[in-house]
Image (tube, rainbow, N blue to C red):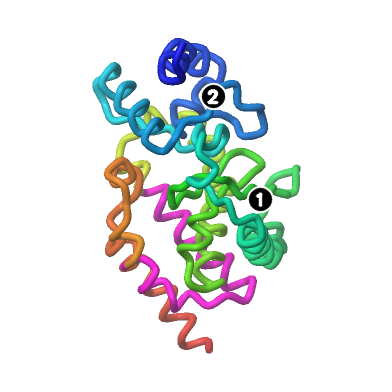
Amino acid sequence: MNRLHLLAVTLPLVLSGCGQYFAAAGGVDLDRTCPYPKLTEAGWTEYEAKVSKTLNRPVTFPMLRMSCGYANPGEVDPRDGERTATRSRAESAWSRLKPAIAASCQSADGCDYELKVGGTTEVLALASEGSVYISYNFVRFCQSEDELAFILAHEASHNLLHKDKFARKASLSRAEIWSMEQEADQSGVRLMVAAGFDPRTLADFFRRYEELRRPSDRGEHPPSAQRLAALTPQINQFRVAK
């Protein structure tokens, strides 16, 4: 049985076992051991195309990619030293953000979210209950600690604000999903500023981000120019404060 066939056979088990969160986020819980064989980047793309054709709608599995990894280590990052430095960079920004996240927490669990840096070739970040995930390549994409802090704060904001909505994300309209993303943007800027980061780099960040957005992401997030326009008043207030 080849890898794609095995995945096709076991997909119903994944969908039934992981419930609404899998349907909403397109993957499995990274706290669990991945039960599937690793694929190459081309293999994952082929698999997503097969599932999309079967379901008659675009489907991607970013969290499954992050959890299971890639058959060719070179597609992730064979340079252990650089990979460790990349993880440390994310952890450094995260450690500065955590007090601001805790101060915004209204949950009894204290919102002590765990940061996980994943080995995917995509520029990808995700929120899951109790965790924030970011790919190595998204860390590398960020040209400053301020940009990195915004992404981490944005994902943490989903956990702070949208835990209940994520459970039924598959049933939400695009307008509702976009509204959630803009709320996370605004909360993310507040968190990064509270942690001492500078949001004035976000104009360049969103310009670069729009250039690489995947087609599947365009239904999940508003256009980058729209997101930046909504954040501009907050950024301008920061300029005045400085």
Q: Earlier in the sequence, mark 2 or mark 1?
A: 2
Q: Which amino acid type is shown beneath numbered disc 2?
A: Pro
- Residue 206 percent coordinates (x, y): 35, 65
Query: What residue lies at 68% left-to-right and 62% top-to-bottom?
Result: 88
Q: Which amino acid type is shown beneath numbered disc 1?
A: Leu
- Residue 26 percent coordinates (x, y): 44, 31
The answer to which of 237 and 139 lies nearer the viewer is: 139
Query: What residue lies at 48% left-to-right and 57% top-to-bottom?
Result: 138
Q: Which mark is residue 37?
A: 2
Disc 2 to disc 1: CB gap under 8 Å: no
The answer to which of 234 and 219 lies nearer the viewer is: 219
Q: Is residue 229 above or below residue 116?
A: below
Count of numbered circles in the view: 2
- Residue 36 percent coordinates (x, y): 55, 22
Query: What residue lies at 54% left-to-right and 36% top-to-bottom?
Result: 69
Q: Is residue 105 above or below residue 45?
A: below
Magenta stretch holds residue 46:
no
Magenta stretch holds residue 203:
yes
Query: What residue lies at 40% left-to-right and 29% top-to-bottom?
Result: 170
Is 228 placed left or right of 21 in the picture?
left
Q: Secondary structure at mark 1?
A: strand
Q: Name the dominant secondary structure of the magenta segment.
A: helix
Q: Secondary structure at mark 2?
A: loop
- Residue 173 percent coordinates (x, y): 31, 35
Q: Which residues, given as a range, are shown in magenta?
A: 179-207
Is 199 placed left or right of 106 in the picture?
left
Q: Residues within 10 Å of mark 2 (few under 14, many from 20)?
A: some
Q: Residues within 10 Å of mark 1 (few under 14, many from 20)?
A: some
Q: Which mark is residue 115?
A: 1
